[in-house]
Amino acid sequence: MENKRLVLLGAPGVGKGTQAREMEKNLSLSHISSGDMLRDAVRSQSRLGIRVKEYLARGDLVPDELMMSLVSERLQENKCAGGFVLDGYPRTVSQARALDALLEERDLPLTGAVLLEIPRNEIIRRLSMRYTCDTCGETIKSKENRENQQCPNCGNRLKRRSDDEPRTIEHRLGVYEELTSPLIEFYQCTGILHRVNGMGTVREVFQRILSALNLN
Ligand code: AP5
Ligand code: MG
């Protein structure tokens, strides 16, 4: 398989993280999640973490320059040389331009952008059932309140993400519409956009991604 350098696009809760993990496992791509990087920073109370904490809690985007320097550092790591899938980055047209410039410098342009699509009511349903483990990153779905219960993977505590409260979900969806959805046209114009239906099981969606990228 030729090296794949991919971007996963889509509204909050469409399954970007879930599918990026499948791609990492099955296609040996390096998974770069901007949201996970920021949440790690908040957890470790680094200077960056202190600076971005409020943006995340409000569901607002962190400043472009900050995001770009974090991601470009990560892209330079050796493990990205065999291909990568970016999850949550870029999120504005200016981030997309900066990414293109960085990859062009190295003669390693993006090979595809996958847009996951699900209806809005399903987004809200999925996010209101999500519990994550702060320690190992495990994500589980539950209709019952699992806050502070044991993580089935490592035994530590499950939490809801601070931005998964109903009002913050609405805000994140608004931010997506305004600032991120223009990327759909951006990647359509460069001819690398693939639209994928994100409804169905994780496996079904993954199979659709493979078909869209001609990988099966
Ligand atoms: P980020 O962490 O990227 O959050 P997001 O885009 O809002 O998306 P989510 O992680 O909530 O959802 P997802 O699409 O990954 O879905 P998931 O697989 O978890 O960003 C968080 C914040 O960081 C931003 O608000 C911003 O502040 C900041 N930030 C990040 N990047 C930035 C950038 N580039 N610039 C500036 N700021 C940035 O799935 C959701 C749920 O559905 C899970 O429970 C999952 O188990 C379930 N699920 C998944 N697939 C299925 C399926 N097929 N069927 C049923 N359930 C499913
Ligand atoms: Mg995610």
Image: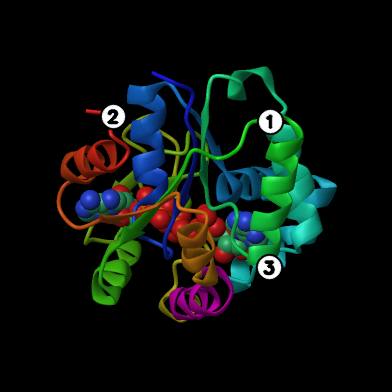
Q: Position of residue 187 (x, y in %)?
A: 50, 57
Q: Position of residue 59 (x, y in %)?
A: 58, 70
* Amino acid on which disc 3 is placed: Tyr
Q: Disc 2 or disc 1, which is closer to the eye?
A: 1
In magenta, the rendered stretch is 169-180
Labelled disc at residue 55: 3
Q: Is residue 128 above or below residue 112?
A: below
Asked whether the residues under the numbered discs 2 and 3 touch, taking CB atoms below 8 Å apart as contact, a structural biologist would say no
Residue with the mark numbered 1: 107
Q: Is residue 185 above or below residue 203?
A: below
Labelled disc at residue 215: 2
Q: Is residue 160 visible?
A: no
* Amino acid on which disc 2 is placed: Leu
Q: Secondary structure at mark 3?
A: helix
Q: Earlier in the sequence, mark 2 or mark 1?
A: 1
Label 1 crowd (10 A; few <14 / some 14-19 / many >=20)? few
Q: Is mark 1 within 8 Å of ligand 1?
A: no
> How far, Cα to Cα, is label 2 from label 3?
37 Å
> How far, Cα to Cα, is label 3 from label 1?
33 Å
Q: Position of residue 43 (x, y in %)?
A: 66, 46
Q: Residue at x 52, y 54 (%)?
A: 190
144 part of magenta stretch: no
Q: Position of residue 215 (x, y in %)?
A: 28, 29
